[in-house]
Image: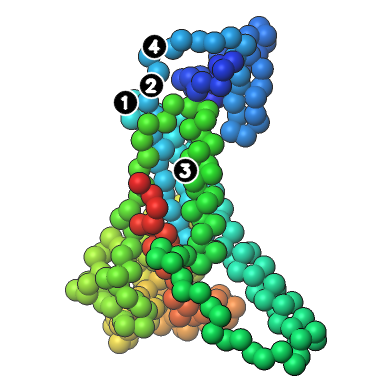
Amino acid sequence: MSKVFVIDSVYQPLNPVHPGEARLLLKRDKASVYRMYPFTIILKQVIEQPDVKPLRVKLDPGSKTTGIAVVNDATGEVVFAAELSHRGQAIKMALDDRRAVRRSRRRRKTRYRKPRWSNRKNRKKGWLPPSLESRIANILTWIQRLSRYCPITAISMELVKFDLQQMEHPEIAGVEYQQGTLAGYEIREYLLEKWERQCAYCEAKDIPLQVEHIVPRAKGGTNRISNLALACEKCNTAKGTRDIKDFLRKKPEVLKRIQAQANAPLKDAAAVNATRWLRFV
Ligand SMILES: [Zn+2]
């Protein structure tokens, strides 16, 4: 269970406390609620806490969300955990809308103005598309926010996901997962993201998933990533070496979904990777 953040009356972050202790402090009028999310209480006096326990923020960047956890390194205890949804697609759509409005206005209002094409500035080094910029801003905001309410001394980030430099256009280049440049671990992570951590056939979640060939090896299927899916043991066994069209003969809509999903490269992988190395120190 996550703990309650505590600050003293001069806004110094103290050790987080158990919710029961926080309830007691509130009841005895020694503290009041400072903020609802993350739940933080403010004490009514200044506390000199000699044994402030340092905490670490752990980040796990994913394509659509980033996991944030505050942990106590000494005990391994998770003090706070949350999942941050990114707004990449929404931002892109808003900018597309703005561009359309401006284009239309230029056509309506300044039709005889000479076109000015060479007025674009060069992009600075480290420039990122706004949709990715927002990911960084979101995460930094949360780190700053958390460090106001608890004694954070370190930040670490999950880095071993997939290395796009190595697996350049994995779906197009047809990297093979056993002997290619991709390690088995990266393939698994890539497939987990691509298939949204669920069985491709029955969409079961939170169960062990096996890497599975959509067109079976026995029927001439390749080891290309686009031919790989994730299946629960039950579906994998049921499918066996049958062709997917045969296996899903009675479920044409599932077949259609799987084929579409298999052929769409995980474009979000690029988003995860583009931001990973930038501006996190
Ligand atoms: Zn299944």
Label whose residue precedes the other's in the sequence (2 or 3): 2
Q: Residue at x 47, y 65 (%)?
A: 128
Q: Give the Cα separation between the discs numbered 1 and 3.
A: 18 Å
Tell whether label 2 touches label 1 (CB within 8 Å). Answer: yes
Q: Is residue 265 above or below residue 25?
A: below
Category of crowding for the residue at label 1, using alpha-carbon neighbours closer than 10 angstroms: few (below 14), some (14–19), many (at least 20)? few
Q: Is residue 225 left or right of residue 147?
A: left
Q: Which amino acid type corresponds to the residue marked 2 in the rendered image?
A: Lys
Q: Is residue 255 left or right of residue 181?
A: right
Nearer the viewer's eye, disc 2 or disc 4? 4
Q: Position of residue 202 (x, y in %)?
A: 52, 65
Label whose residue precedes the other's in the sequence (1 or 3): 3
Nearer the viewer's eye, disc 2 or disc 3? 2
Q: Give the Cα separation between the discs numbered 1 and 4.
A: 17 Å
Nearer the viewer's eye, disc 1 or disc 4? 4
> Any mark on residue 52, and which?
none
Q: Residue at x 54, y 57 (%)?
A: 134
Q: Residue furthest right?
A: 108
Nearer the viewer's eye, disc 1 or disc 2? 2
Label whose residue precedes the other's in the sequence (1 or 4): 4
Q: Is residue 241 visible?
A: no
Label whose residue precedes the other's in the sequence (1 or 2): 2
Question: What secondary structure is marked by label 2?
Answer: loop
Q: Position of residue 121 (x, y in %)?
A: 51, 74
Q: Which amino acid type corresponds to the residue marked 1 in the rendered image?
A: Ala
Give the tally of numbered discs: 4
Q: To which residue does mark 3 refer?
A: 68
Category of crowding for the residue at label 4, using alpha-carbon neighbours closer than 10 angstroms: few (below 14), some (14–19), many (at least 20)? few
Category of crowding for the residue at label 2, using alpha-carbon neighbours closer than 10 angstroms: few (below 14), some (14–19), many (at least 20)? some
Nearer the viewer's eye, disc 4 or disc 3? 4
Q: To which residue does mark 4 refer?
A: 50
